[in-house]
Image (cartoon, grey):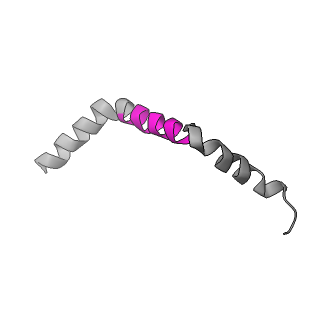
Amino acid sequence: MQELTAAAIFLKQYSVALMFIVFAMLMATIFWPGRRERFDRDAQIPLQDDR
């Protein structure tokens, strides 16, 4: 039970920092230089007729 309490305190204190790290990793993944073509291709999927 003591480990669970310690984990809860850690998450309470550092949750903003952890969310920032997750956000930064997400942004790095999205804006990675080689990903533009893939995202442009995927963005056109809803606009294509039945093919």
**Range covered by the magenta-colored residues:** 18-30
Considering the image in quadrants, where does the C terminus appear?
bottom right
Identity of the residue drawn at 70% across and 53% down: 42
Please, which residue is most extreme toward the front here?
34
Residue 21 or 3: which is nearer the viewer? Answer: 21
In the image, residue 43 lies at what x, y percent?
73, 49
Magenta span contains residue 27 = yes
Vertical arrangement, residue 7 with respect to residue 17, above or below: below
Residue 10 sits in quarter: top left
Q: Is residue 46 in the magenta section? A: no
- Residue 9 in the image: state x and y as whole percent: 23, 36
Residue at screen point 77% across, 57% down? 45
* Nearer to me, 46 or 14: 46
Residue 33's x, y, as percent?
57, 37
Residue found at the far bottom of this picture: 51
Rendered residue at 54%/38% (across/down): 32
The residue lying at 47 percent from left, 36 percent from top is: 23
Q: Residue furthest right?
A: 49
Q: Is residue 9 left or right of residue 21?
A: left
